[in-house]
C-alpha cells in the first residue's frame, strides 16, 4: 500500500501546496492528490509536478460535468507529459449541489455519462498518432485524432464511487475505484469491496486488476484529546457549508444515522460546538485515523492489505502564519526514509 496525502488547498497559496508536495516526496510518500473543490484541479498539480520528480500526482477528483471528455483527456495527456508519467486520473460525477447550484449544469444521466466518460478517457490514453478515436454513445460522441503521442504507458483512470449504482459502473469500467473519507476498514473490506467483486463478475472482469484508493481523515498529535477533537470537527464540516450526500450515506450505512441526523440539523445552523459533542467515540474510532503517533501508525498498518493507496486528509490545525506547519510533524513521524 502506498501512503499519500489528499490536499484541499483551502487557505493555502500554491507555494504552500508545492512545499507540502516536496516534503511528502522527500519523506517517501507515494502519492499527492488534490481535491477539486476549493481549488482547480490542474493548476496546483502542475506546480507540484514541476517541483517534484517521483511522487505520483492525482486530481481527486475532476468534475466530469464541468469538462467535456475531450478537454479532460487532452489535459490529462499534457499533464502526464509534464509529470513524466506520474498521473493518476481521478474523475467523478459530482453531486446535484455542485453541478446545478455552483455550475448551472443539469445533474442528469449520471451513470450513463460516467460509464462513457471513463471509456473515452481510457481510449484517449491509448490512441496513438495517426489513429482516430470514434465513440458513439448515448451521452457522448467523439471523432478525434491526437496531435501528440499520449505516452508510453496509459495513465490509469479512477472513478469516484461508493453508492452501489456508481460502484457497479466503476467495477466494470474504471482502472481503479476512488473512495472518499469516512470509510471504516470493516465497511470497505466487508461491504464495498465484495459488492464491487460481484459487479465485476457480471461483466466478466478480473477483479484482481481493479485498484483501490480511499481517504483517511487523519489527526495526529501527542495530545490525544487534541487529535480527536480535530477529527470530530472535520466530520462536522462535511455537513456544512457544502452538504455532500456521500458523507450522509456512508455514515448511515455504517450505523451512525443518529449522528448524521444531528449534524444535518446543527451544522447549517452554525452550532459547531454542539455538533462536535454529538459525535461519539465509536464514530471517531471507526471512521477516522487519529490519536497519538503510536495509535495512528497502528491504524495505518491495519489498512495495508485493503488498499493500493491510502490518502491522508490531514485535519490538524496549523498556525495562521504557516499553513504547512501541521505537516512537519506528520512527515517526521511517517517518513519512510528513516
Image (spheres, rainbow, N blue to C red):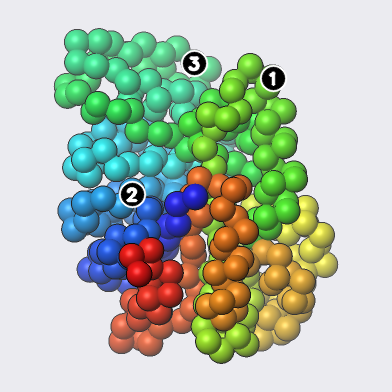
Q: Is residue 152 visible?
A: yes
Helix, strand or loop at label 3? It is: loop
Q: Secondary structure at mark 1?
A: helix
Number of residues whose C-alpha sits closer than 10 Å to that of mark 2, classed few (under 14), some (14–19) or many (20 or more): many
The disc placed on residue 57 is 2
What's the distance in space between the residues labelled 1 and 2, CA to CA?
32 Å
Residues at circles 1 and 2 in contact by the CB criterion of under 8 Å: no
Q: Which residue is mark 3?
A: 137
Instruction: Say which quarter of the image contains residue 257.
Output: bottom right
User: Hey, which quadrant is residue 123 in on the image?
Assistant: top left
Instruction: Locate residue 191 relative to residue 113 in the image: left or right.
Output: right
Residue behind mark 1 = 202
Measured from the top left, where is residue 265 in percent x and y? 74, 71
Looking at the picture, how far across and down is residue 134, in whole percent? 36, 11
Mark toward the start of the polypeptide (1 vs 3) = 3
- The residue lying at 54 percent from left, 32 percent from top is 210
Amino acid at each position: 500500500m502506498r501512503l499519500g496525502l489528499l490536499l484541499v488547498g483551502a487557505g493555502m497559496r500554491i507555494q504552500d501546496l508545492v512545499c507540502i508536495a516536496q516534503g511528502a516526496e522527500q519523506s517517501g510518500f507515494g502519492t499527492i492528490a488534490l481535491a477539486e473543490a476549493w481549488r482547480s484541479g490542474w493548476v496546483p498539480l502542475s506546480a507540484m509536478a514541476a517541483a517534484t520528480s517521483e511522487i505520483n500526482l492525482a486530481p481527486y477528483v475532476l468534475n466530469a460535468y464541468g469538462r467535456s471528455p475531450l478537454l479532460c483527456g487532452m489535459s490529462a495527456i499534457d499533464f502526464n507529459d509534464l509529470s513524466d508519467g506520474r498521473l493518476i486520473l481521478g474523475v467523478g460525477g459530482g453531486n446535484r449541489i455542485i453541478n446545478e447550484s455552483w455550475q448551472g449544469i443539469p445533474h442528469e444521466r449520471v451513470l450513463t455519462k460516467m460509464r462513457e466518460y471513463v471509456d473515452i478517457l481510457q481510449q484517449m490514453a491509448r490512441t496513438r498518432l495517426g489513429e482516430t478515436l470514434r465513440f458513439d454513445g448515448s451521452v457522448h460522441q467523439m471523432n478525434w485524432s491526437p496531435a501528440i503521442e499520449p505516452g508510453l504507458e496509459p495513465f490509469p483512470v479512477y472513478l469516484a464511487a461508493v453508492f452501489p449504482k456508481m460502484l457497479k459502473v466503476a467495477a466494470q469500467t474504471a482502472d481503479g475505484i476512488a473512495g472518499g473519507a469516512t470509510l471504516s476498514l470493516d465497511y470497505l473490506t466487508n461491504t464495498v469491496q465484495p459488492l464491487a467483486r460481484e459487479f465485476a463478475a457480471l461483466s466478466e472482469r478480473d477483479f484482481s486488476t481493479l485498484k483501490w484508493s480511499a481517504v483517511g481523515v487523519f489527526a495526529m498529535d501527542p495530545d490525544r484529546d487534541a487529535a480527536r477533537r480535530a477529527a470530530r470537527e472535520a466530520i462536522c464540516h462535511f455537513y456544512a457549508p457544502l452538504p455532500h450526500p456521500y458523507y450522509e450515506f456512508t455514515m448511515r450505512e455504517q450505523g451512525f444515522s443518529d449522528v448524521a441526523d444531528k449534524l444535518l440539523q446543527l451544522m447549517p445552523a452554525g452550532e459547531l460546538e454542539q455538533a462536535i459533542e454529538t459525535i461519539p467515540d465509536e464514530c471517531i474510532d471507526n471512521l477516522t485515523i487519529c490519536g497519538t503517533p503510536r495509535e495512528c501508525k497502528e491504524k495505518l498498518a491495519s489498512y495495508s492489505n485493503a488498499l493500493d493507496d491510502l490518502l491522508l486528509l490531514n485535519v490538524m490545525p496549523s498556525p495562521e502564519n504557516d499553513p504547512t506547519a501541521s505537516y512537519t510533524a506528520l512527515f517526521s513521524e511517517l517518513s519512510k526514509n528513516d
